[in-house]
Amino acid sequence: MTEASLDVREMVGVEDPGWLLPDVEERWKDEAERARLLAGARAVEREPSLLGVSAHLLVAAHKPC
């Protein structure tokens, strides 16, 4: 982002550490477990120390005038 001269407004992790669970696909099929996985993702998505755990990041940035 810096090399593209963009100002980062926000960076969030798209996946929470739950994707590392060996049975995440089975958990995802269960509605209650899916809700827990999504709650976990929301709880840590903006935590800078955990961004590296996410397999993908989403960045909101803008180019200054």
Image (tube, helix red, strand yellow):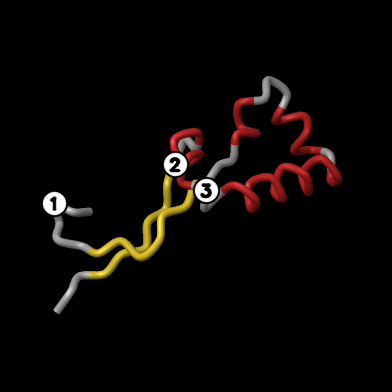
Q: What residue is drawn where x is 65% and y is 34%?
A: 18
Q: Residue furthest bottom?
A: 65
Give amino acid for label 3.
Glu
Is disc 1 placed on a helix, strand or loop?
loop
Q: What residue is drawn where x is 77% and y is 29%?
A: 26
Residue carrying label 2: 56
Considering only order in the chain, which callout, 2 or 1, is on the residue closer to the N terminus? Answer: 1
62 over 54 or under it: above or below: below
Q: Quadrant of residue 59?
A: bottom left
Considering only order in the chain, which callout, 1 or 3, is on the residue closer to the N terminus? Answer: 1
Q: What residue is drawn where x is 69% and y is 45%?
A: 40
Q: What residue is drawn where x is 22% and y is 54%?
A: 1
Residue 1 is left or right of residue 32, and the answer is: left
Give amino acid for label 2.
His
Q: Quadrant of residue 2?
A: bottom left
Considering only order in the chain, which callout, 2 or 3, is on the residue closer to the N terminus? Answer: 3
Q: CA distance from mark 3 to mark 1?
A: 24 Å
Quarter of the figure with the C terminus: bottom left
Q: Nearer the viewer, residue 13 or 23?
A: 13
32 over 10 or under it: above or below: above
Residue 55 in picture, x, y percent from top left: 47, 35
Count neighbours of disc 1 (C-alpha within 10 A) and say few if under 14, some if 14 to 19, many if 20 or more.
few
Q: How many numbered discs, if any? A: 3
Residue carrying label 3: 47
Dot in front, 3 or 1? 3
Q: Residue furthest top?
A: 22
Give amino acid for label 1.
Glu
The label shown at residue 3 is 1
Dot in front, 3 or 2? 3
Is disc 2 placed on a helix, strand or loop?
loop
Count neighbours of disc 2 (C-alpha within 10 A) and say few if under 14, some if 14 to 19, many if 20 or more.
few
